[in-house]
Image: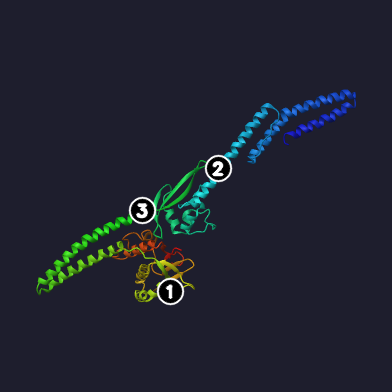
């Protein structure tokens, strides 16, 4: 319409002028001249106005990104060549847009279904998209206002650990649930600019088994050599005590050496016990009954001034597990909490059972766990206690993994309670 309206104005003016002339000339001359003029206007429309109008329509289609519409030929050779080229270009653009949409859809589904935790940022490093795995690791809901934040501004220990990694590099990060992840902060190029993204890959079970196999071999070798050596030394010391006569100082020195050797043998034997941890014998059991059955013994572990509270739900939490092994896990959890409260003189340990969520939580109001310590929890032989051997958490983590449980140990930033949470499988 933008191109054709001047032409139609010219036609109307021509017809008006023809009518005026017809009043002063013979009718036949007037009609002949008018017919000739109309023929010329028709050819002008076919050869110039219609092709230009068609091209203008084509530009409007491109501007509106309407790649489904096509132009019709106009009967002019050069213009029809342009029409065919334009229609071919629109076909290519339509196929390319469809291909890009399909690729984007596939990429979105791939990211969502991936076992990797993935977060995509805008050009300034602000979060714009998380898949479900990353949202779970960060502890955020996908419809909450994390969008537009830098990763370090998200209230999560995982987010803070990611923020410490330099852009363009990768590090292994250990989480509160004893899982290790290889975290990469990389980028891809979009529209000529770098766009950051974050990817967290869980360390495979094969790596964990290889790690376990390595320290089991070391422990078995150490236990064998130390116990054999200590056995001979203890026997020799017993013999020396027997022939030393009445010399009290000699007897005392030899007895001290013998006790120290026995302690050394017991020390290495406790490590060997973790290596020999039996496979669980799974049977139907009730977690509430397990906790009640251990209550008296658990209270005997508490230092003076520390209370134990047990919170049950209306209905029991039933699982398949090994009662003996899970009792030992519960004892170690409460024992660790009690040791963290021993220096305070008073405190509270609570055991809470959530059947609906299939959770068992042991919480205490002790000193808490800092982020540096949280990175080392459940590592073989790591302990925060003076002279600790790191056996308790090793035994707990190994037993829970064999039961298929997920677990975490962390101090909340809100109420400052330290919680050991176990999530039992369905």
Q: Secondary structure at mark 1?
A: strand
Whole-percent x, y for residue 233 in the image? 16, 65
Numbered circle sitting on residue 207: 3
Q: Residues within 10 Å of mark 2 (few under 14, many from 20)?
A: few
Whole-percent x, y for residue 309 in the image? 42, 74
Which residue is depicted at the point 21% across and 67% down? 262
Residue 162, image quadrant:
bottom left
Of the image marks 3 and 2, the number of the one nearer the N terminus: 2
Task: Tell me if 236 is positioned left or right of 32 in this view.
Answer: left
Whole-percent x, y for residue 220 in the image? 26, 59
Q: Using the image as rendered, state which of residue 120 and residue 212 is in the foreground.
A: 212
- What residue is shown with label 2? 100
- What residue is shown with label 1? 310
Numbered circle sitting on residue 60: none
Residue 329, image quadrant:
bottom left
Q: Secondary structure at mark 3?
A: helix
Which residue is depicted at the point 43% across and 74% down? 310
Q: Using the image as rendered, state which of residue 341 and residue 93 is in the foreground.
A: 93
Mark pair 3, 1: CA separation: 38 Å
Callouts 3 and 1 close, C-beta under 8 Å: no
Q: Using the image as rendered, state which of residue 28 and residue 203 is in the foreground.
A: 203
């Amino acid at each position: 319409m933008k191109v054709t309206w001047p032409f139609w104005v010219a036609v109307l003016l021509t017809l008006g002028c023809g009518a005026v002339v017809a009043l002063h000339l013979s009718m036949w001359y007037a009609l002949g001249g008018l017919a000739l003029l109309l023929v010329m206007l028709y050819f002008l429309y076919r050869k110039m106005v219609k092709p230009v109008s068609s091209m203008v329509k084509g530009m409007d289609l491109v501007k509106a990104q309407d790649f489904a519409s096509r132009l019709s030929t106009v009967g002019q050779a050069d213009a029809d060549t342009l029409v065919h080229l334009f229609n071919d270009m629109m076909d290519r653009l339509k196929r390319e847009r469809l291909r890009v949409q399909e690729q984007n859809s596939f990429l979105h589904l791939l990211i969502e279904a991936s076992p990797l935790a993935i977060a995509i940022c805008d050009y300034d490093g602000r979060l714009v998209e998380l898949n479900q795995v990353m949202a779970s690791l960060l502890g955020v809901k996908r419809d909450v206002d994390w969008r537009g934040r830098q990763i370090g501004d998200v209230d999560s220990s995982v987010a803070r650990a990611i923020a410490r990694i330099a852009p363009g590099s990768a590090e292994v990060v250990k989480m509160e649930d004893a899982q290790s992840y290889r975290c990469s902060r990389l980028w891809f190029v979009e529209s000529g600019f770098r766009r950051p993204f974050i990817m967290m890959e869980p360390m495979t079970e094969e790596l964990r088994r290889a790690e376990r196999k390595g320290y089991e071999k070391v422990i078995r070798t150490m236990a064998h050599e130390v116990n054999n050596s200590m056995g001979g030394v203890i026997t020799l010391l017993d013999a020396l005590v027997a022939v030393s006569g009445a010399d009290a100082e000699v007897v005392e020195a030899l007895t001290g050496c013998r006790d120290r050797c026995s302690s050394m043998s017991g020390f290495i034997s406790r490590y060997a016990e973790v290596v020999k941890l039996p496979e669980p014998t799974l049977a139907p059991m009730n977690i509430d009954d397990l906790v009640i059955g251990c209550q008296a013994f658990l209270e005997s572990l508490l230092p003076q001034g520390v209370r134990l509270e047990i919170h049950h739900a209306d209905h029991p939490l039933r699982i398949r597990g090994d009662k003996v092994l899970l009792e030992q896990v519960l004892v170690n959890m409460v024992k660790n909490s009690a040791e963290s409260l021993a220096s305070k003189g008073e405190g509270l340990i609570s055991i809470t059972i959530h059947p609906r969520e299939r959770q068992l939580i042991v919480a205490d109001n002790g000193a808490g766990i800092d982020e540096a310590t949280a990175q080392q929890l459940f590592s073989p032989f790591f302990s925060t206690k003076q002279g600790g051997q790191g056996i308790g958490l090793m035994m707990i983590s190994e037993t829970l993994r064999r039961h298929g449980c997920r677990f975490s140990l962390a101090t909340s930033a809100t109420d400052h309670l330290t919680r050991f949470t176990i999530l039992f499988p369905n």
